[in-house]
């Protein structure tokens, strides 16, 4: 970006001089193009914000972050010169100094206990507020597919939210907060728990209908898929793995009318057999609970996630939001 700007510095200076000569009282309200190229536009910003600029020049206001990221500015203020990239410059996020990473956060339950597996609604709201105030962009898990193929550029501060198991507090406590912030999340349910102490079909349907929540499988019984049980033969073990993947898939397809594509391993544990079975079922992503963010080159069937514990403070939450890893010098 710096190189592009240098190329146009004389133009920008000219534009500033012209602006300086014209009447200072009549400030232009619409943006003015200073320079245009096949790859980008240099623009003097009028009273438009990043969303309206994205609508006009990128054809989609949801891509406002492309403009904010390119200019390292949120919000884009009137009167400044900016660059609008017209092409995806670097979809993998790999740079000379390091590479982009996307943290996937993993929650379980919401309630008043504030223990390891339970986060209070107050804590959850504070965390969502922090993401908003610090310009993190909460993206749906499916957006990672293109990033992992090296095809899709993601916001620099992209974060993914996931919630495991299917406890009913997800609907009662977390869902209203997610709706308030407009943040997408993926809920991974194990099917024996559905309508049996866990989330009810009506709650799953309501969350899916909101357009914010994706419901995906987290096994049938929540057994560990990598450990052979006592007296379990090889073929019996293979059959169990197959069922732990196909049964929740079939049930979710039946209830929600859509075939699942992503799978969260119970206890985060996986092996080659489990991954082969996911692939045979047309699943595209597998999620562990290995505490690391994800690069474009992370293996899609062993994605990392960072568990958020209710007995940790905001400092710990902030530390889980790693969106760039510098190369070791
Ligand atoms: Zn679980």
Image (cartoon, rainbow, N blue to C red):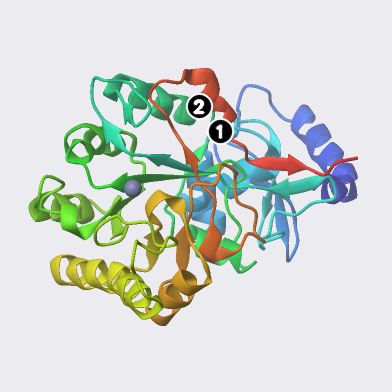
- Residue 64 rendering spot, x and y as whole percentages: 53, 47
Helix, strand or loop under label 2: helix
Dot 1: within a 10 Å radius of its alpha carbon, few (fewer than 14), some, or many (20 or more) residues? some
- Give the labeled residue for mark 2: 317
Q: In screen coordinates, is 7 left or right of 284?
A: right
Q: In screen coordinates, is 259 left or right of 107?
A: left
Nearer to the camera, 310 or 159: 310
Judge whether 248 appears above or below 128 on screen: below
Res 107 → quadrant: top left
Quarter of the image with the C terminus is: top right
Judge whether 121 appears above or below 64 on screen: above
- Count every numbered label the image shows and give the total: 2
> What residue is shown at x 55% (from left), y 26% (from top)?
318
Residues under numbered marks 1 and 2 in contact, where contact means CB atoms less than 8 Å apart: yes
- Residue 197 rendering spot, x and y as whole percentages: 11, 45
- Give the labeled residue for mark 1: 320
Res 302 → quadrant: bottom right
């Amino acid at each position: 970006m710096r190189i592009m700007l240098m190329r146009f510095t004389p133009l920008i200076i000219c534009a500033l001089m012209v602006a300086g000569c014209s009447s200072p009282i009549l400030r232009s309200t619409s943006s003015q193009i200073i320079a245009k190229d096949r790859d980008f536009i240099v623009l003097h910003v009028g009273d438009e914000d990043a969303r309206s600029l994205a609508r006009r020049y990128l054809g989609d206001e949801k891509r406002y972050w492309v403009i904010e990221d390119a200019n390292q500015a949120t919000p884009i203020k009137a009167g400044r010169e900016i660059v609008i990239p017209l092409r995806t410059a670097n979809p993998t996020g790999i740079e000379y100094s390091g590479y982009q990473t996307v943290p996937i956060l993993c929650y379980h339950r919401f309630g008043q206990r504030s223990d390891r597996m339970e986060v209070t609604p107050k804590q959850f709201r504070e965390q969502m507020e922090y993401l908003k105030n610090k310009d993190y962009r909460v993206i749906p898990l499916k957006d990672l597919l293109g990033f992992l193929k090296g095809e899709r550029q993601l916001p620099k501060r992209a974060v993914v939210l996931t919630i495991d198991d299917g406890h009913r507090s997800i609907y009662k406590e977390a869902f209203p907060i997610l709706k308030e912030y407009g943040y997408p999340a993926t809920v991974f349910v194990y099917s024996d728990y559905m309508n049996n102490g866990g989330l009810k079909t009506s709650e799953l349907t309501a969350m899916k209908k909101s357009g914010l929540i994706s419901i995906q499988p987290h096994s049938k019984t929540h057994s560990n898929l990598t450990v052979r049980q006592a007296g379990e033969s090889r073929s019996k073990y293979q059959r169990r793995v197959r069922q732990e993947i196909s049964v929740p898939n079939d049930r979710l397809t039946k209830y929600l009318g859509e075939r699942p594509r992503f799978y969260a391993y119970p206890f985060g544990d996986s092996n080659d057999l489990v991954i082969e079975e996911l692939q045979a079922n047309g699943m595209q992503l597998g999620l562990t609970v290995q505490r690391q963010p994800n690069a474009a080159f992370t293996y899609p069937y062993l994605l990392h996630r960072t568990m958020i514990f209710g007995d940790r403070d905001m400092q710990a939450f902030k530390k889980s939001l790693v969106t760039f890893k510098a190369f070791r010098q």
